[in-house]
Image (cartoon, rainbow, N blue to C red):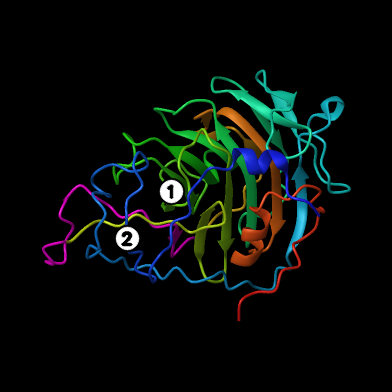
Amino acid sequence: MARSTAASRRRRFRLIRVAGLGGLLVGALPGLLGTSAWATPRTPTAVTTTVTGQSPAGDAVPREVTARWEFDREAEAGANSVPGGPAMTLGGGAKLVPGAGFLGEGGLLLDGKRGYASSTVPVDTGTSFTVTAWVQTSVESTRRMTLVSAAGNTTSSFRVDFVPARAHRAGGAAWEATMARTDTAGSKTVSAVNAGGWNSGTDWNHLAVVYDAPAQQLHLYVNGQLGTAPCFDDDRDGAADDPQCVPAVPWADHARSFTAQRSLQVGRAKSHGTFGDHWSGAIDDVWAFRGALSSEQINYLSSGWVGLPTEVPDIPEAG
C-alpha cells in the first residue's frame, strides 16, 4: 500500500507532544493560538483539569464500518463504499469536484451558505461510535462552521466544528466536538476542544470524534493526535494568569448522547430546530463506525494511505 503523493505535498501540520495527562505543552506555535494560551517558548506551570483523558475503553458494541463516503464517483456523488450502506444526498448546491479531495479522485465542495450532504444516521449515537473525515476550510474562517453532525428533531446529538480564534473561549482557533444529552433546545452538553497537531484550517486535516458510551467519554483527534492548550500559572497560585483563559482539552468526561433519529449531516448542524453553521471548503473520505476505535486505529486512518480498504483497521492496541 503506497502513501498518497497528494498527502505528501499537502500535509504541512506540525505535531505537538503532550507531557502527561495534565496537558502541559512546551513551546509555541505562532499563529495557531492567542496569547492567552501561548507565549514565548518556556516551560510554564499549567493549570490542570479534572478530566482523565483515558483511552477509549470499548464495550459490547463490536467495531464495525457502517458507512464510508469517498466522494470519488462523479456519476454517483454520494455513493457509500459499504455494501448496503446509506447513500449521501447532496443539497444546497453542494458539488463533487474531481481533484478537490485529499485522497482518491474527488472531494465534496461546500459554499458555506446552503451546501450540505446528508444520509440516514448509520450509527446509534446513543451507544459507542466513531466518525472520521478529511477536511479543509476555503479561507481562515471568522465564524463557527460544522464539519459533521447527527440531527434529532430539535438539536444535534453530536457535532464537530471549526471554531475561529475570536470565538473560542481560550483565545485561539480550535476544533470542537459537542455532545447533547437530550433532543431539546436547552439540553446539557459537554465539549472536547482540540488545539494542537495542526497549523491552519486551510490545510488538510484529519478529524475523528470517538464516543465511548460505557466510559461516558468523548474524544476529538486532529491528525491522529489529542492536542491540548493549557492556561499558564507562572505565579503558581493555582489559577490561570489570564482569568479569561480556559484550557483546551480534547476529551470530556460525563458525556452522554441521545439516539439521533433524523439524519447524519455533512457540512451543517441543527440547533433549536433549524440548520446552520454551514461549512465553507472541502470534505473528503467520511467514515462511520459502530464502536469506539482505539487511538492506534485513529492514527492509522489519519496517515493518508491510498487504497485504504473499507474495513476496521486491524491495528494492535498498545498494551
- SS under mark 1: loop
| Quarter where residue 315 is shown | bottom right
Indicate whether 93 appears above or below 49: above
Q: Amino acid at mark 2?
A: Val
Residue highlighted by disc 1: 187
Using the image, tell me which numbered label, if any, was put on residue 119. none
Q: Is 244 in front, or is 313?
A: 313
Mark 1–mark 2 distance (CA, rounded to whole Å):
36 Å
**Residue ID at (80%, 58%):** 311
Indicate whether 297 appears above or below 110: below
Residue segment shown in magenta: 234-256
Choose the circle earlier in sequence order: 1 or 2. Answer: 2
The answer to if 249 sits in the magenta stretch is yes
Q: Amino acid at mark 1?
A: Ser
Can the viewer see residue 151?
A: no
Residue highlighted by disc 2: 26
**Residue ID at (87%, 47%):** 84
